[in-house]
Image: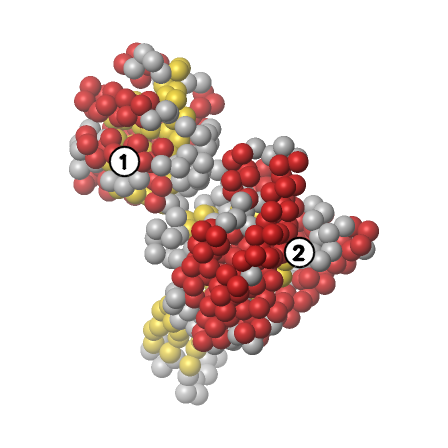
Amino acid sequence: MLNKVDEAGNIAEVMAEVGRRAKAAAAPLAIASTEQKNRALFAGADAVLASRDAILAANQLDLDNAAKAGMAASFIDRLKLDDKRLEAIAEGIRAIAALPDPVGEVIAAWDRPNGLHIERVRTPLGVIGVIYESRPNVTADAGALCLKAGNAVILRGGSDSIHSSQAIHKALVKGLEAGDLPVDAIQIVPVTDRAAVGEMLKGLDGAIDVIVPRGGKSLVARVQSEARVPVFAHLEGICHLYIDKTADLEMARKIALNAKMRRTGICGATETLLVDRAAAATHLVPVLDDLAASGCEIRASEEVKALYPSARLAEEADWSTEYLDAIISVKLVDGVGGAIAHIGQYSSHHTEAIIAEDADAVARFFNEIDSAILLHNASTQFADGGEFGMGAEIGIATGKMHARGPVGVEQLTSFKYCVRGNGQTRPV
């Protein structure tokens, strides 16, 4: 495996070759049988466990390098693999294998008056480039999801997890061999130089059909700014929870606490709490007491601070900040209309939730907010492909393309029209 520019030669040439090999592998993969793909996935999962010692030894090299570099404890925790996490990786691959094969699915069918029968059929996208940071499990998740959807994939993980990702990739290649599929169907970028990312964003001479970035704001921003091919991604998860005057108080307390504090560092964590001004006397203080008791810092509008003096006064920037931490901004609004207006101004179009018993308020919230995921009486932390029953996900997309919300195997496909006739010609 090449890791240095002087060993690899010209990075543009190296990456162009990766692209050519991926494109060549995509053609047979697109017509591979479900049985072949599943055999490759199950064998890949078995290989991950059979390679346990090698993967953990590779991971230890990454952990040692991270410690020497003074990486934060939270970073090292994301990087670390152990027996339990390897079991979870293998189980995740098996779960993807168990999903229905989207390729060839007839999405819609209809007949025309002239006798033509038209079908809209799912097809693979082709070659997907996945650029991610130092979470070695993404190597398995992304590789397995793309394979199930009939796509070749080029994986570019973080340099900090290079040894771990390479070891996991070797297990996936063993799976491809077991399924009699091209070993180039899942490739890992053979250089750690960041110039390789730039080459991927150019599209590798037309080889890459879609780029999926998975990582922090700076990575996603670069990809969205520089990519010359379509991108499935979200820049930020500025998620809102609105508590209506008709909300059940105990439900609101339970959901608000979970939405913010279950895991504060994920993109589906609530960052702003909006409370109906008509419910301030009944709902605001109990909900904020629960959050404060769990260690959450409250950043409040002037009106909220007057009712909850221990809160810190919010600044304008707070309403557009993705904290990814035990911090929440809180504001009173005039009913569901006020919530919709605030969300329209500050949302990143990721996930928003309403707690209410008023069906009209819920309908208006769902109809007027343009975010990828909307929830009623449920935590924003359900913004996850696994929780949607989609198996694993390759990420969350907030764009307006066909892939919006959790990006699973169906979202990693396109479609074509198959038209059947019996001799029809179009009139002059």
N-term mark: 2 or 1: 2
Name the residue type under label 1.
Answer: Ile
Q: Secondary structure at mark 1?
A: helix
User: Image height check: is 14 above or below 182?
Assistant: above
Identify which residue, 58 or 286, lies in the foreground. 58
The answer to whether 6 appears left or right of 227 in the picture is right
User: Image height check: is 30 above or below 226?
Assistant: below
**Crowding at mark 2 (Cα within 10 Å: few <14, some 14-19, many 20+):** many
Q: Position of residue 313 (x, y in %)?
A: 40, 15
- Give the residue drawn at x 36%, y 69%: 108
The answer to whether 398 appears left or right of 73 in the picture is left
- Give the residue drawn at x 44%, y 40%: 267
Please name the residue that numbered disc 2 is placed on.
189
- Give the residue drawn at x 24%, y 30%: 253
Q: Quadrant of residue 349?
A: top left
Identify which residue, 223 or 5, lies in the foreground. 5
Name the residue type under label 2.
Answer: Val
The answer to whether 381 appears left or right of 54 in the picture is left
User: Image height check: is 40 above or below 305?
Assistant: below
- In this view of the protein, can residue 384 be seen by the observer? yes
- Give the residue drawn at x 39%, y 66%: 98
- In this view of the protein, can residue 15 be seen by the observer? no
Q: Position of residue 318 (x, y in %)?
A: 44, 24
Q: Position of residue 372 (x, y in %)?
A: 39, 46
The extreme front residue here reads 53
Give the Cα separation between the discs numbered 2 and 1: 42 Å
**Crowding at mark 1 (Cα within 10 Å: few <14, some 14-19, many 20+):** many
Please name the residue that numbered disc 1 is placed on.
255
